[in-house]
Structure formats: structure tokens, C-alpha cells
Image (tube, coloured by chain):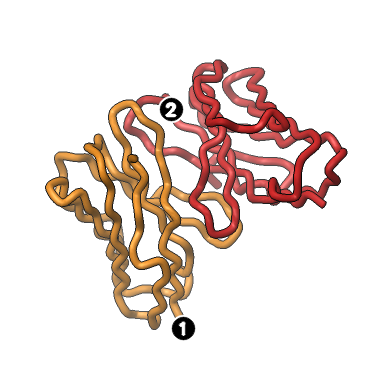
Amino acid sequence: SQQGEEDPQALSIQEGENATMNCSYKTSINNLQWYRQNSGRGLVHLILIRSNEREKHSGRLRVTLDTSKKSSSLLITASRAADTASYFCAPRGSQGNLIFGKGTKLSVKP
Amino acid sequence: ETGVTQTPRHLVMGMTNKKSLKCEQHLGHNAMYWYKQSAKKPLELMFVYSLEERVENNSVPSRFSPECPNSSHLFLHLHTLQPEDSALYLCASSQVRTGPDEQFFGPGTRLTVL
């Protein structure tokens, strides 16, 4: 299955700390995408990393991809209370749809 | 705002009602999607439309009936639903279906079936 599996399922940190979420998948991919969802709302695309990339940055976000281990990580630096949300990874093959996992629920306490 | 709107935002219906969910995208995309998100379950892909043609139906019960009259609008017609159909229904769009690009999501319709 292309479904990404996020780890941990829940993460609670203090404002200012870094948050790291991991994602594992099972098949070859074209790219891997990370999304964020605030409670009861739609998903918002955060960052896309292609299979030939190893690391990508966007503001306070840093994503890594290790295709040999079929894993990715999302690092949020200097977290803020507004970062509280669920985060999903979505691996994507060349033809397939995005298949989302259950997500990591991040809580950032002020 | 992502350019994808959904109405209504909240809907409560009885099991014998007929209602429709509406999705509209203002991004010029050619692919549109319906997802179901239930509590504690992964986001489930229900239907995929590409250039107004349904290209995927992931074993969704016939009480859910999608309609895509043009590339900007997507409907989900609901009839004789069950309480277990209560969920957040999300619409999304992307430039093309098989490309590598991201999907843009609407805010969702929170559906409660009594």
C-alpha cells in the first residue's frame, strides 16, 4: 500500500521547542507530501519532496526523505501554539492517488 | 483561502432525507476528489473525477452519488444514509489527476446523520 504511516500518533511539546514527526511507507514513490489539518477543517499542503531530493526547507519546516529506508521526517522548529494541528504524510506513486495515514496530532502548549 | 469552497459547512439529516453537498474550485484544476474523514480513521478517498469523468469509485455505497457537471463543480448527493455515515466530507482539487502536484482542500462539510 502507498499509505503513509505517521509516528508518533500524538506529540505534546512546549512553545519554542522543536517537533519531529516521522512517516514510513512501503512502495516506491514519485514524491511525498506533508499536509496539516486544523481541528475539523480541510487539509493544507505544507511541502512536497521529490524522490530524488533528500532534504527540503520551507520557513520553519524541514523535511527529509530517505528512499532506501522508505521514510520521511517533518521537523518544525521553534514551534508556536498556532502549530497545534494534525500532520499527515502522503506518499505518491507515478500513477496513484494520495493515500493519507492517520496523522500525528501535535499539541503545542503556550 | 485555498480556492476550494464547500457548502454547507454543517448538515444534520435524518436517515430518510435527501441532501446534496456542493464543492466549487476556482483554481482552474482538472481533477476533483471526495474524501470521507471519520473519527480515528485515515482519510478515505471516495471518488475521483478527471476532466468531468469519474475515474475512480472506491467501493462506496450507492447511497452516495457524485456528480461533476463541469470542471469547477462537484456534488455529492446523499440519500437514505446511516448514522455511521456521519463524518467530515472533504472536497479537493488538483491540476491533473496523475501529475505530481499537490491537492487543494476545501474546509469540509460536517455531516451528522440521526
Q: Quadrant of residue A23?
A: bottom left
The chain holding disc 1 is A
The tint of chain B in the picture is red
Secondary structure beneath dot 1 equals loop
Q: Position of residue B93 (x, y in %)?
A: 51, 33
Q: Position of residue A65 (x, y in %)?
A: 19, 51
Q: Quadrant of the N terminus of chain A?
A: top left
| Residue B81 versus residue B12 in the image, above or below | above
The tint of chain A in the picture is orange
Identify the residue at horizontal 38%, vertical 80% (top origin). Answer: A13
Q: Position of residue A69 (x, y in %)?
A: 15, 51
Q: Label 1: how many residues lie within 10 Å, few (<14), some (14-19) or many (20+)?
A: few
Q: Which mark is residue A81?
A: none
Identify the residue at horizontal 57%, vertical 21% (top origin). Answer: B71
Residue in front for this viewpoint, B90 or B38: B38
Amino acid type indicated by mark 2: Gln
Left or right of residue B87, residue B30 in this image: left
Q: Position of residue B30 (x, y in %)?
A: 49, 22
Secondary structure beneath dot 2 equals loop
Q: Quadrant of residue A95?
A: top left
Identify the residue at horizontal 75%, vertical 44% (top origin). Answer: B82
Q: Are marks 1 and 2 in contact (CB under 8 Å)?
A: no
Where does label 1 land, which residue? A110
Amino acid type indicated by mark 1: Pro
Q: Quadrant of residue A18?
A: bottom left
Q: Label 2: how many residues lie within 10 Å, few (<14), some (14-19) or many (20+)?
A: some
Where does label 2 land, which residue? B95
Residue in front for this viewpoint, A110 or B82: B82
